[in-house]
Image: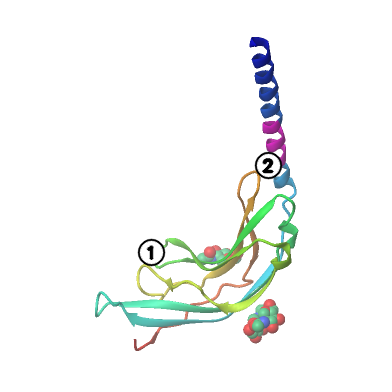
Amino acid sequence: MHSVYARINNVSATLSTSLMILLAAIACSSFLFTANPTGSVNISSVKVFSAEARRYPNRQQEFAFVDFNITADLSPLFNWNTKQLFVYLEAQYTNTQGVQNEVVIWDRIVVRKEDALLNYAGKNKYPFRELSKKFKNIPPANYTLKYNLMPYVGLLTYGEAARTTAPVAFPLAKERVE
Ligand SMILES: *[C@@H]1O[C@H](CO)[C@@H](O)[C@H](O)[C@H]1NC(C)=O
Ligand SMILES: *[C@@H]1O[C@H](CO)[C@@H](O)[C@H](O)[C@H]1NC(C)=O
Ligand SMILES: *[C@@H]1O[C@H](CO)[C@@H](O)[C@H](O)[C@H]1NC(C)=O
């Protein structure tokens, strides 16, 4: 009895060791196979509107509305170990206090290689506002298309697919009646 148990234990220990080595090898290989996708980010217009914050009358909060156009071929990122891609457009700017800000204004999850050819024109999906309430005097922003690659086995990988060729200025705010 004893020896049978010992044997089973030994076999399963060997199996799980092999499995660990295999998984580690897969995790390393997906780094090696990560391709660099290329694309373009085109900001057609940025508008800034000022609105009265609902909770605090007399306090103006500015919102930026970004019209953009992105194309990217993310299909090189798809291999047998690709579970999904989280793709997002990020605005990067330095505010008047000198703080570097990164704001996600749009995102999409891509699970199939067939959907990995991005060609999208639209507006920001999430409200884009500045903590200091105003975009006035804030230097032009860069817009970057980034992704997180979530593999079946291994670590999340981050990457950049495209960015604006030149920084884009924030215009002065227009009043908006709510
Ligand atoms: C960006 O797209 C607009 C139309 O949406 C076009 O007029 C403009 O030429 C494009 N800019 C670049 C750099 O491709
Ligand atoms: C998107 O931008 C490309 C250039 O980057 C341009 O050729 C195309 O016309 C734009 N499409 C839309 C819908 O703005
Ligand atoms: C925008 O990109 C340019 C060129 O890569 C860089 O010099 C500048 O510092 C960037 N600005 C911000 C606010 O990240």
Q: Which residues are magenta?
A: 19-28
Tag 2: amino acid: Ala
Q: Tell how many labels.
A: 2
Task: Tell which residue pokes out farthest to the front in this image.
Answer: 1
Q: Name the residue: 71% across, 49% down.
A: 81
| Camera-nearest residue between 33 and 174 | 33
| Above or below: residue 73 compared with residue 8 | below
Q: Position of residue 157 (x, y in %)?
A: 62, 51
Q: Residues within 10 Å of mark 2 (few under 14, many from 20)?
A: some
Q: Name the residue: 37% across, 75% down.
A: 134
Q: Name the residue: 35% across, 72% down.
A: 133
Q: Which residue is mark 2?
A: 27
Q: Position of residue 17 (x, y in %)?
A: 68, 27
- Res. 21 image quadrant: top right
**Tag 2, which secondary structure?**
helix
| Above or below: residue 66 compared with residue 8 | below
- Image quarter for ligand 3 equals bottom right
| Above or below: residue 73 compared with residue 52 | above
Q: Main secondary structure of the magenta part?
A: helix
20 drawn magenta = yes
- Give the mark, 2 or 1, whose residue is nearer the N terminus: 2
Mark 2, ligand 3, within 8 Å: the answer is no
Task: Find residue 97 and name its label.
Answer: 1
| Above or below: residue 110 compared with residue 134 | above
Q: Position of residue 2 (x, y in %)?
A: 64, 10
Kindly check if marks 2 and 1 are in contact, taking CB atoms under 8 A apart as contact: no
Q: Is residue 147 left or right of residue 51?
A: right
107 drawn magenta = no
Eye-nearest disc, 2 or 1: 2
